Amino acid sequence: MRKTSRTLTAGFLALGGSGFLLLSGAGTAQATPAGAPAPAICTQLLAASKSYTATLKGNEKKFETDRTAYLAAVDNYGSEVTRITSTGSPALQSAAKTYVTDLETEIAASDINQARLNTDDDRMAVLACTPTGAPRTGGGSSAGLQDPALFGGGGAAALAGLVIVGLTLRGRSRTSVE
Amino acid sequence: MTAWSKRRIAALAGGVALVAAGGSVLGVAVAAQGHAPQPGPAQAGAIPAPSSSDGNASPAAVKPRSSVSAATQGSGIQGPVLAQSTPVSISIPAIAVTSRLMQVGLNADGTIQVPPLNDPPFTNEAAWYKYSPTPGQPGPSIIEGHVDSASEGPSVFFRLGALKPGDLVTVTLADRQVAVFKITAVRQYPKSQFPTSTVYGFTNYPSLRLITCGGSFDEQSGSYNSNVVAFASLVSAHPG
């Protein structure tokens, strides 16, 4: 019983430290611009993670006494992760396979390597939620001529002055010749 | 001296005065130009390749501290890591940046959302990409900020391109830990050739990516044609 309890706690921790749990609302967003949801696989993995967490929390007492049920819950989660990522890139599929294998093996053996599971999950999260390109982080106010009125006014004044000086000098030279 | 020559002298003086005034105004306009610094070859530094599934990348110089967990044995992770905790603020002393961190997700086209361009004070705040690892966790934590905005002028990451390898970045987490990162490289990439895997790819150590815009501004598309990216690795942590 004590061992099962430790394993269950470790199982919680394994997920609690994962990249996807944070997405389930644990963060402290100050302001989040409205926008499209994350890529489908990212969203589905998040949902699976939330569901798994809820299952563990909702059945904590049961799983302490029913190890078979606990392992079945872990297995279900692993299957769900595998199914969701099956349409993803080969790298994501590989990362998911590693994560599921490590999770199931370690929980079955009651030998949790927390850091490894966190890393497996972070790697999977990064691959599932990778942005596609460069962000548009600028409005252009500091690009090019920042004060066209100043440049235009100054340039026009200088040009007008040059024209006046030129015409005046030209007129003087004509007068001299005459 | 005739009346004609007096008028000519007056015109000449007026012309010279106009040239001087115009030149002065142009000088002021040129002096007022404040372009965002662009990273040069000296700042290029070194970027460890994103790790493969086996993981073979290494951080630049991670120095374990007592406040940093080193319990990463068997995980393929190099160097210490921090507990997962949402970032709440960032400080970059070298370029006088201090900012709260908002959170952003993805746009419909798959690019990272950005803080609103016309909604101060959020326009001038940096933002953490909420689907990236939290700072101090293995992998690249992504933080971005505007270089400028039409309404506010220079913005939070205006001087990001002036960072140099060795400069420090601190990120305060919700659990009050302060993660200290060291800049390892600062690069500029054309948006059309943005190296997604280099910037966003998984790293086998806690890393940080600071992103803003750079290069020239395309009025037609309303966007800069490049991005400036600062790469950093976790070096230590301490309670905030």
Image: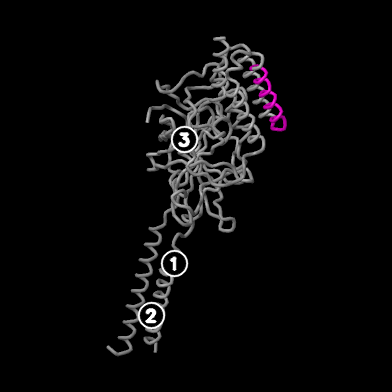
Q: Residue at x 45, y 26 (%)?
A: B61
Q: As rendered, which of B17 and A1 lies closer to the eye?
A: A1
B39 over A47 or under it: above or below? below
- In the rendered structure, the residue with mark 1 lies on which chain? A
Is any part of residue B239 visible from this angle?
yes
Q: Is residue A74 magenta?
A: yes
Q: Which of the numbered marks, if any, corresponds to residue A103?
A: none
- In the rendered structure, the residue with mark 3 lies on which chain? B
Span colored in magenta: A70-89
A3 over B202 or under it: above or below? above
Residue type for callout 1: Ala
Residue at the spot of label 2:
A169
Q: What x and y, as percent, mark residue B221?
A: 59, 55
Q: What x and y, as percent, mark residue A176?
A: 37, 86
Dot 3: what SS? strand
Instruction: Give the CA separation, mark 2 to mark 3.
Output: 69 Å
Q: What x and y, as percent, mark residue B72?
A: 51, 19
Dot 1: what SS? helix
Q: Residue at x 47, y 48 (%)?
A: B147
Quarter containing the N terminus of chain A: top right
Quarter containing the C terminus of chain A: bottom left
Quadrant hosting residue A83: top right
Residue type for callout 3: Pro
Residue at the spot of label 3:
B87
Q: Residue at x 32, y 78 (%)?
A: B13
Closer to viewer: mark 2 or mark 3: 3
Dot 2: what SS? helix
> Within 10 Å of the Cα at label 3, are there few (<14), some (14-19), or many (20+) other Cα atoms?
many
